[in-house]
Image: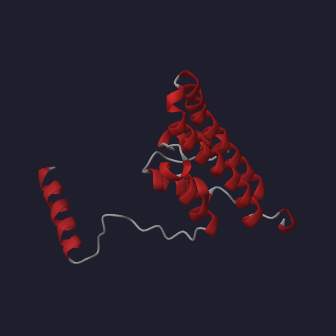
Amino acid sequence: MEDLRKEFENFMQERCVSGECSSEEEDSYDYPDYVEAINSELMPPNRSGVYISRWDLKMVADAIEASIAMDARARMYKMLMRSVHDRQTMEKLLGAFASLIDAKIEPYREMMEVYPSSAPIFRDKIEKAERVKRYFDQILETYFREDEE
């Protein structure tokens, strides 16, 4: 067994020296433009006001009956977006994200009531989250027009 392990390590080392390996597998799937558009607004917490975790992505996938494996957030997001092929699925996906955002900003609203001096901090996060939810409507209108179906 030890010989097999050494042989495999030598093989991998030789392969990497010759430039045949890479630390990151490239994703050759051709994603539509809306994938990056939503990603740039939703995933960075400084843009959306909320943090979307891997478990959140898993819950959103379950909400639209998609199956995705636990992985890095970026990969999970892309796997999730592969399951969107029509306006109806996109509406379900964006609705699930909107519900998730609502659940995440509810504690912000409660904190603003309990600690009024923290209101400016949480108000900014809530405004960002609400802006992202409005952006979802733009995504539907821009990329999934009803007259195209």
Q: Give whichever of 97, 108 is nearer the camera.
A: 108
Q: Residue at x 68, y 55 (%)?
A: 135
Q: Is residue 100 left or right of residue 70?
A: right
Q: How far across and down, in percent of the image, does residue 38 sit?
A: 60, 58
Q: Is residue 124 left or right of residue 74?
A: right
Q: Give whichever of 125, 4 is nearer the camera.
A: 125
In the image, residue 84 sits, relative to residue 123, either above or below, namely below
In the image, residue 102 sits, relative to residue 127, either above or below, namely above
Q: Quadrant of the C terminus?
A: bottom right
In which quarter of the view is residue 10 placed?
A: bottom left
**Residue furthest toward the bottom?**
18
**Residue furthest toward the front?**
117
**Residue furthest toward the right?**
147
Q: How many marks?
A: 0
Task: Report whether residue 145 is seen.
Answer: yes
Q: Residue at x 63, y 64 (%)?
A: 34
Q: Is residue 61 left or right of residue 2?
A: right
Coloring scheme of the render?
secondary structure
Task: Report whether residue 86 is seen.
Answer: no
Q: Residue at x 42, y 68 (%)?
A: 26
Q: Give whichever of 137, 20 is nearer the camera.
A: 137
Q: How far across and down, in percent of the image, does residue 100 sit?
A: 61, 39
In which quarter of the view is residue 109 placed?
A: top right
Q: Is residue 144 left or right of residue 102?
A: right
Q: Residue at x 48, y 50 (%)?
A: 46
Q: How far across and down, in percent of the image, does residue 59 sit?
A: 58, 39
In which quarter of the view is residue 143 placed?
A: bottom right
In the image, residue 149 sits, relative to residue 44, either above or below, namely below
Q: Give whichever of 51, 143 is nearer the camera.
A: 51
In the image, residue 147 sits, relative to residue 1, either above or below, namely below
